[in-house]
Image (cartoon, helix red, strand yellow):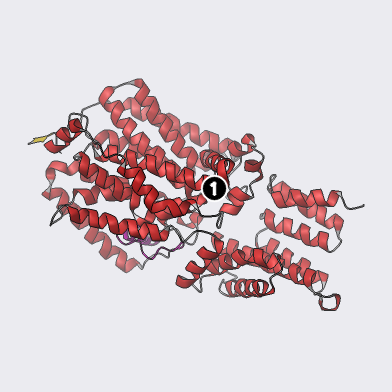
Amino acid sequence: MVSGGIEEEHCTGTRRGDSRGWLIPVALVLVFWPALLGDYVGDDHRLIANNVALREHDFAAMLTQPLFGIEVGYWRPVTVLGFWLGYTLAGAFGVHLLALLAHVAATFFVQKIAGRFVAPAMARWIALVFALHPVQVESLTWCAALNDGLWSLAALGAMLAAARWRDSRGWWALLAVGSWCLLALLAKETGAVAIPLALAAAAWLPGTSGAIPRFRWWPLLTLLTMVFAAWLAARAWVLSEPLGIVLSGLGENRCDFDPARATSILHGQLVLLVWPFPLIPLRIPAPVGAVVVSLMIALGIAACAAIWRRRTSSRWLFGLVVVLLPIAPVALHHETIGLYPIADRYLYLSVAGFALLVGSLPMPGPAWLRWILLGAMAVGSFRGSFLRQDDDTLAVHSLEYLPQDPAILVMAADARLGAAFDGDPFALLRCERLYRRALARIETADEREQRKRTRATAQLGLAWCRLLRWSAADRAEKPPASEVLDAFRAAIECDPRDPAAWAGLGVASGELGRIKAARAAFEHALELEPHNAAARRGLRRLESVPK
């Protein structure tokens, strides 16, 4: 029997309840516990470990400053507060623990959404596919990727709240929809996707009786419009951007749509849902020719399945929307995002729609075959959880797959720079070679934002190596002081807005006895980033130097 397009097993399953909810947290802990032992890697150092606002509990700065300072206009106060909470609790372990707890909560939300379509046992399986899919590794093992788990959790909450409001017409449920959507927006700009997803949930999620009730759209549309407008106005105020620039997308997060590249990105992301291997941090878009073929096959299968199972068409429509909508911002803003717009963390929420679609497919053979598939995902995720333990581990793994990529070469050099500062001559030599290899592979005419940042980071790394050689060498072997300062000026020329380069120039000037120049460089770094730890530390040291 069918009621409102939903199988009868859903209704009876809902009454019977689910007594195996403990499986979800247990499975997640068993698979992802290595992630809890990981250290800060990559952007984690800048965003968390060296973030003065977090260390000084400066909530005003956390709520009003862009995530990367003036370099990129990302305003994500909920994410920054998440960093602060995890950092305050237990450093990197605390941030990873917060990411794991958010993932557990998101998994239960997915189970509740799936439970509106299928029986409890299948809903639990769908939730575990979402939880254990290997693309989720990046969001749980990289502290900086916490924002994807947070905004996706809020979007799932908005979908459930929208369905509850439609069923009950209660104002508390409507306010819950707006609150969840606002949290999603404040966690990451991609959280704007929560608004159409909430509308999709109201349109296609079954009610408690199995049918999809009729309702008036205007209260929900009005509230969501107000939430989005309030977020835009707050963002314009915090980033000092005219509201028209925010609305048109012509600022830092500009909309620069290229159909061919967008199609390639969409294809690359969808492929990761089916085959997320090898687990590497940076991925390159697939050829456009393969894109067209893959999309035609995927759409053909989805259309045939929807026609074949007309009774559950709303399940397919909802699943496809959840798969595709979270990827759309990446395709629209690929130039702003950078050279590697295909990333596992961008698929965090899309996995929920993928799991719902896979759970709706008729699978031949006994039911335990589904659990074998789940076990294979768990093994892949468990292995991937070890790949971001620290910068060295990540660099070695990345170089194995992309040994000529400039960004990977710079990342590997940065990972060894600390050992060079500790006096390891072999680490210093390796850093110099890696930075030079990276610069040799970046065309000077390449004006893409991420390429310019990679070039600037490599130049800054070489400048530090030059300063280390000056500091360690005997007086007769010291390179000229002008070469050391010119190296830092070259890094500044690549990116004049980088406070780290100006702080480095301040350190070098101070080491060379040019106190006035050092103070000016540190002060300029603080103008660019008022909470820059290196510049603050440098100025404190200069205060003890006799004038």
Q: Residue 131's x, y, as percent?
A: 34, 48
Q: Residue 332's x, y, as percent?
A: 42, 52
Q: In this view, does 277 lie above or below 525?
A: below
Q: Where are the magenta residues, as a range? A: 259-282
Which residue type does callout 1 highlight? Gly
Q: Name the residue under label 1.
A: 251
- Farthest residue to the left: give it: 1
Residue beneath the point at 28% across and 38% down: 113
Asked if residue 274 is among those painted magenta in the image, a careful observer would answer yes
Is residue 447 visible in this depiction of the protein? no
Q: Residue 510's x, y, as percent?
A: 82, 59
Q: Is residue 450 left or right of residue 347?
A: right
Q: Is residue 277 above or below residue 83?
A: below
Residue beneath the point at 69% across and 74% down: 425
In which quarter of the view is residue 296 placed?
bottom left
Q: Main secondary structure of the magenta part?
A: helix
Residue beneath the point at 73% across and 68% down: 487
Q: Is residue 115 above or below residue 452?
A: above
